[in-house]
């Protein structure tokens, strides 16, 4: 039970930082990903949903890295 509190704290920190980064860089990411030229091949695959899924996957990987690192080191 004692090991759960640091993992939960670090996971909460990662989620908070991911949320902050999402709000800071949302406009820049949209400008980069949603290109105005329709003939570009990859421009149609970048949608808001894809960006959100990528942010969730990134946060999940960071939380998994924290849990693995914490269990190996302690």
Image: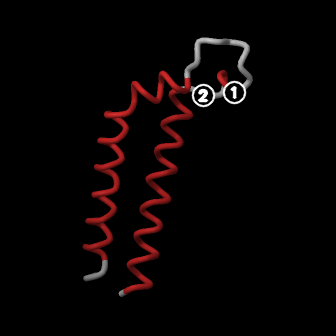
Q: x, y (%) of residue 9? A: 26, 65
Examine the rendered structure and indicate whether residue 42 appears above or below residue 13: above
- Out of 1 and 73, give the one closest to the viewer: 73
Kindly indicate the quadrant of the structure image that contains residue 63: bottom left
SS of the residue under disc 2: loop
Contact between marks 2 and 1 (CB within 8 A): the answer is yes
2 vs 1, front mark: 1
Q: Residue at x 42, y 72 (%)?
A: 67
Label 1: how many Cα within 10 Å (few below 14, some 14–19, many 20+): few
Examine the rendered structure and indicate whether residue 49 appears above or below residue 55: above
Residue 53 horizontal side relative to residue 44, left or right: left
Residue 14 horizontal side relative to residue 62, left or right: left
Q: Residue at x 52, y 26 (%)?
A: 32
Image quarter in which the N terminus is found: bottom left
SS of the residue under disc 1: helix
Q: Residue at x 34, y 52 (%)?
A: 15
Residue 48 horizontal side relative to residue 12, left or right: right
Q: What whole-number distance in Å separates the C-alpha atoms at marks 2 and 1?
A: 7 Å
| Residue matched to label 2 | 46
Kindly indicate the quadrant of the structure image that contains residue 23: top left
Q: x, y (%) of residue 20? A: 29, 41
Q: x, y (%) of residue 59? A: 44, 53
Numbered circle sitting on residue 42: 1
- Out of 14 and 3, give the one closest to the viewer: 14
Q: Residue at x 51, y 27 (%)?
A: 48
Numbered circle sitting on residue 68: none
């Amino acid at each position: 039970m004692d090991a759960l509190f640091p993992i939960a704290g670090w996971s909460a920190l990662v989620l908070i930082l991911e949320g902050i980064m999402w709000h800071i860089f949302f406009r820049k990411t949209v400008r980069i990903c949603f290109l105005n030229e329709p003939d570009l091949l990859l421009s149609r695959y970048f949608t808001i949903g894809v960006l959100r899924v990528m942010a969730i996957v990134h946060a999940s990987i960071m939380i998994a890295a924290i849990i693995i690192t914490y269990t190996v080191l302690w």
